[in-house]
Image (cartoon, rainbow, N blue to C red):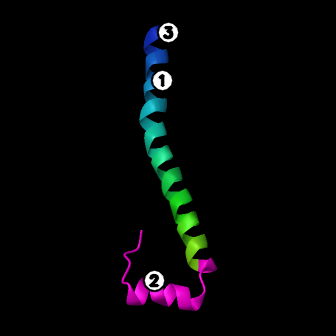
Amino acid sequence: MAAVTCGCIVGGWVLCGIPVLGVLAMMVIGLVEGIIYLTKSDEDFYQTYAIQKKEWF
């Protein structure tokens, strides 16, 4: 019985841990992108995203 309980706990951590890591990764990427956008000058932003038509991340 203890082996089944341990297996369920470990399996739950693995299955629940993967989506949590994905969410954390998206949060970090969003934070970095936001900092990049906010620290660009208006001229650099216009040149990069309007004239060169760079795609968003």
The secondary structure type at the circle numbered 3 is helix
Residue depth check, mark 3 versus mark 2: number of the one nearer the observer: 2
Residue 39 sits in quarter: bottom right
The mark nearer the N terminus, 3 or 2, is 3
Judged from this view, the residue extending furthest toward the right is 39
In the rendered structure, which amino acid carries the disc numbered 1?
Val
Q: Is residue 53 magenta?
A: yes
Q: Where is mark 3, residue-wise?
A: 2
Q: Residue at x 48, y 38 (%)?
A: 17
**Depth check, front residue: 2 or 45:** 45
**Span of residues in magenta:** 38-57
Residue linked to disc 2: 48
- Residue kind at label 2, given as amino acid type: Thr
Would residue 46 be counted in the magenta stretch?
A: yes
Residue at image mark 1: 10
Separation of residues labelled 3 and 1 (CA atoms): 12 Å
| Residue 28 pos. (x, y %) | 56, 57
